[in-house]
Image (spheres, rainbow, N blue to C red):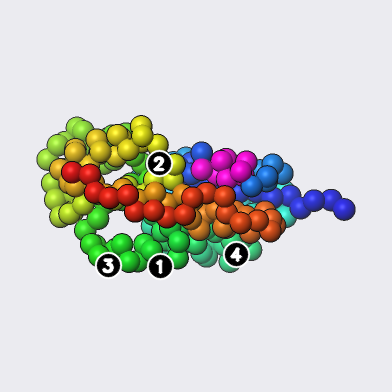
Amino acid sequence: MQRPRLLVLGCGALAREFSELLKLNGLAEVTLECLPASLHNHPERISVQVRERLEIAVHRYDKILLGYGDCGTGGGLDLLCEEFNVVRLPGAHCYEFYLDGGVFEALHDSEPATFYLTDYLAKHFDRVVFDGLGITSHPELLEIYFGNYKRVVFLTQTDSRVLRSHALHAATKLGLPLEVMVTGYGQMETAVIDFGIRERKPTSRSLQTVGTVR
C-alpha cells in the first residue's frame, strides 16, 4: 500500500522548528516547504501566496498541514483551509501555538501591553523589527510603535544562551524589562505528530517559567 503524500506548507520563520520536529518524530516522509518569513510584516499578502501554492500542491499531496496560525489574515487562512480541505496550526499566531492551550490567554490577560519574541524573532530582531518597520531609518517611530508596551516576553523553544542574549538586546533597544519562558514546541509539536499519523508523545520540554531579566 502506497504511503500518503504529506506536505507541511509553512511560514519561513518556522522552517528550523518544523525541520527539527519532523526529525525528532521520525517523519522523514513529510515534505516541508516554506513561504518567505518577510510576509510577517505584510499579513495582507499571506493568503494570496498561500492560495497560489495550494492550487498546485493539492494535486500533488494527499494531506497538507498549513504551518501558520491566523497570522493577521483576519480569517483568510481559515477560508483557504475550508476551500482546499487542509488544516492549519492551532491559534492565532506562533506565540499561541508554542504554548499549551490557554497559556497565552493567561499571559495576555496578566499584561496586554506585552511584546513577544520567539527564537526566530529574537535572532532576527534588528532586521525583522527595526529594519522591517523602518525604525532604523526613522528612530522617532520607536515611540509610535512601542511607546505603550510594558514588557517583553521571550518564548524560547530551545533555551539557547545565545538567543537569550539576543532577546536581552531586543528588550534593551525597546527600553523594556525582559521575561523568559521556556516553552518547547507546545501545540505545534502535537499538531505535527497528529498530521504525520504517529502515536507518540511530544519529545520537547514542557513549559517552564524562568523569570525576569532586567
Q: Earlier in the sequence, mark 3 or mark 1?
A: 1
Q: For mark 1, does the 10 Å Cα neighbourhood hold few (<14), some (14 to 19), or many (20 or more) residues?
A: few
The residue carrying mark 1 is: 102
Question: Decide: marks 3, 1 in contact (CB < 8 A)?
Answer: no
Whole-angstrom CA distance, mark 3 to mark 1, is 11 Å
Alpha carbon of mark 3 to alpha carbon of mark 4: how far? Answer: 34 Å
Which residue is disc 4 drawn over? 83
Tell me which corner region of the image, top left, top right, bottom left or bottom right, holds residue 128: top left
Write down the residue under mark 2: 159
| Residue 73 visible in the current orientation | no
**Coordinates of residue 88 in the picture (x, y in percent):** 54, 59
* Element at label 4: helix
Is 136 covered by the magenta stretch?
no
In front of the other: 184 or 54: 184
CB-based contact (under 8 Å), mark 4 and mark 1 = no
Q: Which residues are magenta?
A: 17-24
Q: State the image quarter where residue 96 is shown.
A: bottom left
Q: Which residue is mark 3?
A: 109
Q: CA distance from mark 4 to mark 1?
A: 28 Å
Nearest to viewer (mark 4 / mark 1) = 1
Secondary structure under tag 3 reads helix
Residue 168: x and y in percent read 25, 38
First-in-chain label (4 vs 2): 4
The structure residue drawn at horizontal position 51% and vertical position 38%, both measured from the top left corner, is 16
Answer left or right for 27 relative to 142.
right
Q: Secondary structure at mark 1?
A: loop
